[in-house]
Image (cartoon, rainbow, N blue to C red):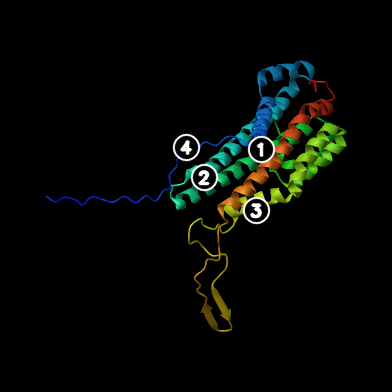
Amino acid sequence: MTEEAPSTTIALVPPTLVPVTPLPPTPREEYISTTALELQKTGGAPDTTGAFVFVHLGPEWVDRVTEILGRVGSAGEQLAIALATNRDARRWTAPDASGWNVQFATMAVRAQAEMAAMWTLSAAHGLANALVRMLLLNPDAAKVVNDARPTANGFPPFSEDQAAWVSFERTILKATRKAAVVSGSPAAVIAATELSALLGDQRWTALLDLRNVGFHRWRPQTVDGGTPKASSVSISGTSRSISVGIGRSNVAPDIESTLKIVEAGLDLFSKAALTFDENIHAAINELSGKQLFKV
């Protein structure tokens, strides 16, 4: 009978627990939190809203308005998740969080920072879809929106068809601005313009670039190593040579820079989202031609 030698387990997986570090909310975090809460309030009480719409606009509008407000509320939760992951990333960098394995902490911060970026972008997608559906309440605006996305087949309420869900991108936002102007709704113009303005801001561009590196290009690793961005082989006629260096050609951004990019984009979106929310009820009134909400 032989005995097996005891195995040695090497911890290759970073710890998942965030340091239990006191982290009082900052004024910017309180602003984001308030914005997220206001968006979620907008999406609250769908049954009450549905009954109200049934009486004042008619049964054909119940699903549409319920979907619009519900999508805003969902974006609010996504914004809150973005803030939560941003705060967890910051816990790793707090002064009294020392003593953690530096390599693990770096990996954890990057993971949570980029997750915050993802949830911020998800919230932006949500408001873009709420805006599109809101504009469908006006016949003139609806024509512009439907012409821009014919495959959506009129954006049926609660559709699971991927074609009926737009991304937060330049083409559809340009169409929503045009539709808002055509509708004659001042509040809709403000809402559409506020969201569209994000695309022209370098802080939002930096957030998108961070996402693109993660999903669409050669992603730099947080630790040494990784696939280079370009070939090391040179060709000259029939000659072939390879360049071997000691440095990496694909270097990850430092963690603090990543956090600053995420936080700047999160702050920017929160401001736009709050302005959007402040105008959505007036926009629904103006687009539908009914005084459905008191504003």
Tag 3 near tag 4, CB within 8 Å: no
- Does dot 4 land on a helix, a strand or a loop? loop
Nearer to us: label 1 or label 3: 1
Rate crowding at label 2 as few (under 14), some (14 to 19) or many (20 or more) other CA atoms within 10 Å: few
Q: Is residue 177 left or right of residue 254?
A: right
Task: Give the left or right position of residue 180, taking residue 74 as reference.
Answer: right
Question: Residue at image x 74%, y 31%?
Answer: 277
Residue 70 in sight from this viewpoint: no
Q: How many marks?
A: 4
Using the image as rendered, state which of residue 47 and residue 136 is in the foreground: 47
Structural distance between the alpha carbons of marks 1 and 2: 20 Å
Check disc 4: other Cα within 10 Å, few if <14, some if 14-19, many if 20+: few
Between the C-alphas of marks 4 and 1, the distance is: 21 Å
**Is 265 drawn above or below residue 213 in the view shown?**
above
User: Which quadrant holds residue 253?
Assistant: bottom right
Q: Give the residue number, with chain letter if any, for mark 1.
A: 28
* Alpha carbon separation for disc pair 1 and 3: 23 Å
Distance from Cα at disc 2 to Cα at disc 4: 12 Å
Tell me the residue at 66%/38% (across/down). 28
The residue that disc 3 covers is 209
Marking on residue 95: 2
Nearer the camera: disc 2 or disc 4:
2
Mark sitting earlier along the chain (1/3): 1
- Pointer 4 residue: 20
Q: Given contact means CB atoms under 8 Å apart, are the residues at marks 4 and 1 in contact?
A: no
Front position in the image: 98 or 238:
98
